[in-house]
Image: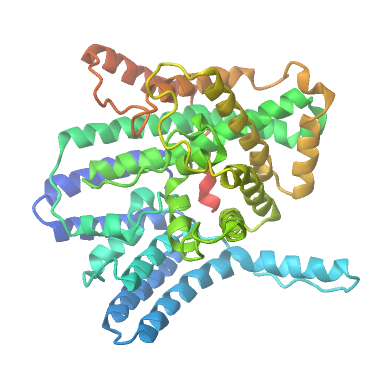
Amino acid sequence: MLFNSVEYLIFLPTVFILYWFVLKNTIKGQNLLLFIVSYIFYGWWDWRFLSLIAFSSIIDYCCGIYIEKANTQRGKKQWLTLSMLVNLGFLGVFKYFNFFSNSLAEGFQSMGYQLDAFTLDVVLPIGISFYTFQTMSYTIDVYRGQLKPTKDIVSFFAFVSFFPQLVAGPIERATNLLPQFYTARKFDIAKAKDGLRQIAWGLFKKIVVADNCAIIANQIFDEYTTHSGSTLFLGAILFAFQIYGDFSGYSDIAIGTARLFGFNMMQNFAFPYFSRNIAEFWRRWHISLSTWFRDYVYIPLGGSRGGLSMKVRNTFIIFLVSGFWHGANWTFIIWGGLNALYFLPSLLLKKNRLYTNTVAENSFLPSIKESFQILLTFCVTCIAWVFFRAPSVTFAVDYIGGILSSSLFTVPKLGVSVLPFVLFLLIIEWLQRTQKHGLEIGNYHIPKVFRWVFYLGLVFSIFWYGAEKQEFIYFQF
């Protein structure tokens, strides 16, 4: 079920009414409702995969209990290992088996040996990379003693399958989200209003910005051999805003929806295209995933505690694994490797923690230096996005080669029509860069009439300028 669909437009208010008006006095009833509707939401795509998420939930629920019961460290580790093997096993079979099989066959063929690849004809379950990481965080935190295992199976199943963020995040930590299922929720009108504003902004980013950028970006990428370097570069820029509007739009809708039901989820995007270097970009882009890798992979590997060689090694491991998490294709691995290379100067010069504040924090406009830093960071990010978008490494190399041709300095032939949407997005988010999302009111005192004119204009633009409905990009991951 898509957030930008008629079905969801019926689904959400129905669940909201049942949750707050029928079951408002019973937390167990609310949790049971969330569990049931979340399975309906997920099964809307393919009901067969409900057994997969249910099996994963049962395994991790039991492993959490037995980790605590185990009397020895070895016993605890065995139950944690079982949880990891099941979750990573699902990912390995459904997402990566064919990649490894094909890569092995190609490797033998390059050495002169004929080897036919054995592949599985399976459909990738939607959201599997997200909910497996979420459940693994639970068993890891129980193993570390950071979280008590739950005995409430309904709350745990609702936590794993919580429909707002089930298929594309944010990847919530059990330490943050799970305890909220134990606590009585009271309807907060201020929180609900803020949630609706965040949903509206997410829909605008997805339907108006991302989907319109997608039309032009797809046309440019599909016919890249016929376009000038300037048009190809504009195509990369439009894809950058497509994936940002698409993914951060989903996160805004998910977080806003959770707020309607009294839940607080972590911020997943913090205006990343205003970053002054790659280190800052990755603190602001897909925060739930980058912090997941930091806490469960980077720090256990030694983090930044060792010498320079260990820091460089761990950095490359994190970015390469992050690329591989996104998809079973060498293009994603190269995308991760490129970002590691981008990150390296900040690491070597010890500037990776330099920009932890908001850009132009005490002024309306950035300085000349900040403007140059933002532009440079955005441009190198767009080049990396070409590998993310390309179907093959050869395609990406040829595309970038086309950008770097002499025609880079000509006038683009496509894409200008969507630039007003992108400009509007940038203006609003620049003004709101100190807030949690584009429409958070914060400490502003804006007359109600102006706010409602803006909201109505936003809704009008969603219906009037909305492009042909497209699935969210991150559903494939």
At a point 54% along the width and 44% down the height, the residue shown is 350
Instruction: Tell me the quarter of the picture where residue 446 sits.
Output: top left
User: Toward the viewer: 415 or 110?
Assistant: 110
Would you say residue 15 is visible in this rendering?
Answer: yes
| Residue 413 in picture, x, y percent from top left | 73, 19
Nearer to us in this view, 267 or 349: 349
Measuring from the top left, give residue 416's x and y in whole percent.
63, 18
> Whole-percent x and y of residue 32?
22, 60
* Rendered position, 141 above or below 388: below
Q: Is residue 214 visible?
A: no
Q: Nearer the viewer, residue 45 or 57?
A: 57
- The image quadrant of residue 133 is bottom left
Is 293 situated above or below 393?
below
- Percent from the top left, x then y, of residue 253? 37, 39
Left or right: where does residue 55 sit relative to residue 349?
Answer: left
- Could you say which quadrant of the image residue 417 lies in? top right
Please tell me whether residue 146 is drawn above or below residue 4 in the rendered image.
Answer: below
Residue 250 appears left or right of 412 = left
Q: What residue lies at 88% left-to-right and 70% top-to-bottom? A: 111
Residue found 71% across the figure and 31% down from its top: 220
Note whether 257 is above or below 378 in the view shown.
Answer: below
